[in-house]
Amino acid sequence: MNSRGTYVASRTHHAPMWRALRDDGWRITSTWIDEAGPGQTADLGELWDRIAREVGESSRLVLYVEPDDFPLKGALIEVGVAIGVRIPIRVVAPRVELEPRSLRPIGSWVRHPFVRMCGSIDEAMEGADLCL
C-alpha cells in the first residue's frame, strides 16, 4: 500500500465533504480544504506552491465536479500538475453530461491514460490510503 495519500480537487464549496472524508480516516493531502472560505488564504502564491508540492507527493488525485461547478478553475491546474508528475487521476462527475467528442464541459483531457471516470466518491477512493 502506498502511504502518500490522496489529493482532492474541486470547487471550494465542496471542502466540507473532503474534511468529512479526512475525519472518517482517509489520508487527504490537500490543505486548501482548511482555508476554503473567502479571504482565508493569506498568500495565494504560497498556496499554489503548496498545492503543486501536495499533488506531487500524493499517490492519486480525485477531482469532484457537479453540473453547477463549471467553469473549473484551479482544479484544472491541479489535474495538470498530476498528469505532469504521472499520478493517477479519478474523476467523479455526478449528473455532468459530457459532449461525445469534446467531452465538454470537462474536456478531452479525461481521455488521458492516467485518468479514470468513476461513478462515486467511494469508487474513486477505492484502494486509497487510510490514516491508520
Image (cartoon, helix red, strand yellow):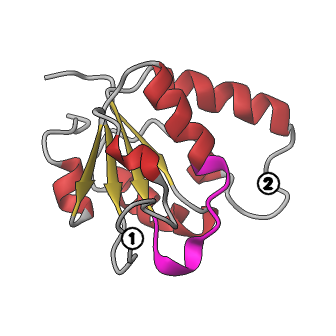
Are the two marked residues, 2 and 1, in contact with CB atoms closer than 8 angstroms? Answer: no
- Nearer to us in this view, 51 or 27: 51
Provide residue 54's location: percent of width, then percent of height: 52, 27
- Residue drawn at (42%, 52%) of the image: 63
Q: Is residue 104 above or below residue 32?
A: below
Q: Start and end of the magenta stretch?
A: 65-75
Residue at position x 19%, y 60% in the image: 122
SS state under label 2: loop
Q: Crowding near pointer 2: few (<14 within 10 Å), some, many (20+)?
A: few
Question: Quick check: 71 above or below 50?
Answer: below
Q: Quadrant of the C terminus?
A: top left
- Which residue is more in the foreground, 27 or 105? 105
- Going from N to C along the chain, the mark reached first, 2 or 1, is 2
For the question of whether residue 25 can be seen, the reply is no
What residue is drawn where x is 40% and y is 76%? Answer: 96
Q: How many neighbours does mark 1 have within 10 angstroms: few (below 14), some (14-19), or many (20 or more)?
A: some
- Amino acid found under the numbered disc labelled 1: Leu
Left or right: residue 64 versus residue 11 is: left
| Whole-percent x, y for residue 110 in the image | 38, 48
Query: Which of the two residues, 56 or 116, is positioned nearer the viewer here?
Result: 116
User: What separation in Å lies between label 2 and label 1 (alpha carbons)?
Assistant: 33 Å
Check residue 70 for magenta coloring: yes
| Amino acid type, label 2 | Gln
Residue under label 2:
40
Q: Is residue 44 magenta?
A: no
In this figure, which residue is indicated by the disc labeled 1? 98
Residue 46 shows up from this direction: yes
- Image mark for residue 117: none
- Residue at 13% in and 39% down: 127
Residue 111 sits in quarter: top left
Quadrant showing the N terminus: top left
Place of residue 97 in the rendered image (x, y in percent of width and height, measured from the top left): 38, 77
